[in-house]
Image (cartoon, rainbow, N blue to C red):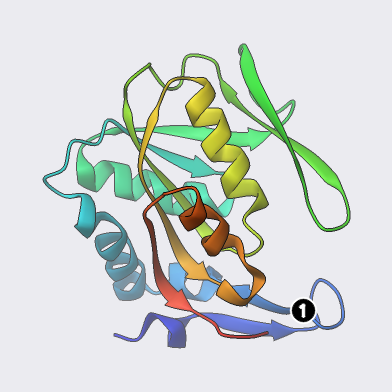
Amino acid sequence: MNLKSKIREIPDWPKKGVNFKDITTLLEDAAAFKQAVDELAAPFLGQKIDKVVGIDARGFLLAAPVAYKLGVGVALVRKKGKLPSRTVEQEYTLEYAANTIAMHDDAIKPGEKVLLVDDLCATGGTALAACDLIAKLGGKIAGVSFLIDLPFLGGSGKLKARGLAVRRLVEYEGE
């Protein structure tokens, strides 16, 4: 099945000139959702992965079933102030603002092999910050997987420049 055909595009949302990639239509389709999870997990079956890390919030919807498929735990990267226990934080810059993300300070054990999963890679700021958090906790990144990549915005290139293996299921060459 062509997963791209299951993703709804919404022009000029959240602002003019942005063609938003809405994955809710893919998630609502049982066969498409299953295929996406299976394809995200497939390269890591048989590898030693200790945790799957999902990025707030749509990344959680993919990371949890991928972790289940791999038979490992899932850890969360959330916006600052959203986790109830002690956290480590990482600030990062977007094109127009700065944000801070956090993980529980015991979410990743030193030496654990981690798969980072999110729904979309655009400029890469959030994914790079999540990689920094994983590294602060002593985790080793086995791969970074996205449902959607927007390579024209440069994010996946920045991750690859760090030597990270990047996988995506769907790619858009422009807005």
Res. 120 visible in picture: no
Quadrant where the N terminus sits is bottom left
Number of residues whose C-alpha sits closer than 10 Å to that of mark 1, classed few (under 14), some (14–19) or many (20 or more): few
Which of these two is toward me, 87 or 110? 110
Q: Residue at the location (79% across, 76% down)? A: 13
Residue 175 location, x and y as percent?
Answer: 68, 84
Residue type at mark 1: give it.
Answer: Val
Could you say whether the residue bearing mark 1 is in a helix, strand or loop?
loop
Q: Residue at the location (83% across, 43% down)? A: 98
Q: Is residue 152 left or right of residue 34?
A: right
Residue 53 location, x and y as percent?
Answer: 44, 38
Q: Quadrant of residue 19?
A: bottom right
Which of these two is toward me, 70 or 143? 143
Which of these two is toward me, 65 or 95? 95
Question: Label 1, on which residue?
Answer: 18
Q: Is residue 167 above or below residue 110?
A: below
Q: Is residue 45 above or below residue 30?
A: above
> Furthest residue to the left?
46
Q: Quadrant of residue 129?
A: top right
Residue 145 location, x and y as percent?
Answer: 40, 56
Residue 113 location, x and y as percent?
Answer: 30, 32
Q: Residue at the location (35% across, 86% down)? A: 2
Res. 32 visible in picture: yes
